[in-house]
Image (cartoon, rainbow, N blue to C red):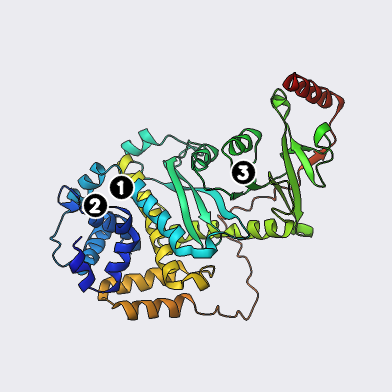
Amino acid sequence: MSHCSVRRRGGLGVAFERLLGASWKGGEKRVQRWTLLSLAFVWLFQSLSRSADLGGRFQDARRWLQRLTPRRRGATYQGFVKALRRSSLLPDWVAHALRERLVEWSGPAFRVAGWIPLALDGTRFECPRSRSCQQSFRLASRLKSAPQLVLVSLWHLGVHAWFDFRVASARVGERTLARDLADGLPKRTLLVGDAGFIGYDFCTELLDRGASFLLRVGANVTLLADLGAWANVGRGVVHLWPRGQQDRPPLALRLLVVGRGKKKVYLATNVLDPLTLSKKQAASFYRQRWGIESAYRSMKQTLGRRVVKSRASDLANLELAGVVLGHWALALLALKVRGHATATRGWSTAKAAALLRTALTHGLRVTAWRTAWRRVLLAPPKRRGLKKRRQDWAKAKHDPPCGAPIVRRANPSELAAFKCLTTTSTS
């Protein structure tokens, strides 16, 4: 991507150059007839296209690229796919670059109450019933279902943007991908997840990696309220120690009960000091966790990427990664426009995508582009006249609440096992 041609076209080219180019000195290297920056642009911003097929999405993204860089010659979809397959380091580089911009553009909002709060969750995307996808993505759901990919991601609760993600076949468990995401996290990171992630092995591995967590617990979890040495740690301290793991040390957790009545939620955290993580702050973090669910809905429904279109399994992985990175880039552009003072304000995927699509199609100078974005993204929310009611959709899942965990006192056999374990460790 030519630097001089980008700057002559105004603010969008400069914004994209800052988004990716500043973090990668090899952006001008070529793969086939593509520079890596041009390849990244088309790969990411295909997610903004409203076309229903891959060829139409490629044509839209290439047209936007030609508007930013008029010297860019035409290319075919087949050549784009070959270049994308040969640039094996492209996904890792783009994710690393976007993460650097997230830290840089968030400012003080990157940490909330001394923590880096990251929501942890997963979702699935359907793939075509091609031979390649069926062989690579084995059946992971009910019979006769389509091949599926699983996406497990980290969503920053402070500035409403992605932090990291992993894509794999749906037969790979969400906890397996979450363990990979937990490697190399910054200090004072707090992982906030739902009841599907609580478990002795998973929580122990998070502790070994130095990560702090705040997870919901349900009726399928049994916690011990009194176990020897930890009896005087403080109020609310319980212990996760399943029967099959009594040859290993018990896991000390702090049990928090937030909400009232039917909205009561039980949370467990390995942060035992209430001064480090208060109950009020923990409740706020878990309430904000719904942002990652809204982000998944934005990708699937607002951007129309519920189903992966690529029939080759390797391209299906790349297509889904491009959708996530494209939404991540959109979130960072919205964050850059909001600025540090309003970094924590929410933003609309539909409005941001429509504005960026218009700017790429018709062109806007840097001042007009920033003014339009700030006018839309920082507009006060509209007041609703009536309270919103949930529709009774026929195909919607209405899972029962996970309930309250079972909290009981340790029995004599568990106390004896703990005493034997502590005696062996001290001798």
| Location of residue 28 in the rendering, given as x and y in whole percent from the top left corner | 20, 54
Q: Please tell me which residue lies in front, 133 or 163.
A: 163
Nearest to N terminus: mark 3 or mark 1: 1
In screen coordinates, is 407 left or right of 183? right
Which quadrant of the rendered structure holds the C terminus?
top right
Which residue position is annotated with label 1? 90
Please identify the quarter of the rendering in which residue 127 is found: top left
In this rendering, the answer to whether 263 lies above or below 356 is above
Task: Give the residue drawn at x 34%, y 61%.
Answer: 19
Disc marking residue 375: none
In screen coordinates, is 221 left or right of 193? right
Which quadrant of the rendered structure holds the N terminus?
bottom left
The answer to whether the residues at label 3 and label 2 have Cβ atoms under 8 Å apart is: no
Which residue position is annotated with label 3? 196
Q: Please tell me which residue lies in front, 244 or 112.
A: 112
What's the amino acid at mark 1? Leu
In screen coordinates, is 204 left or right of 123? right
Which residue position is annotated with label 2? 36
| Location of residue 109 in the rendering, given as x and y in whole percent from the top left corner | 54, 64
| Location of residue 252 in the rendering, given as x and y in whole percent from the top left corner | 73, 38
Camera-nearest label, 3 or 2: 2
Nearest to N terminus: mark 2 or mark 1: 2
The answer to whether the residues at label 2 and label 1 have Cβ atoms under 8 Å apart is: yes
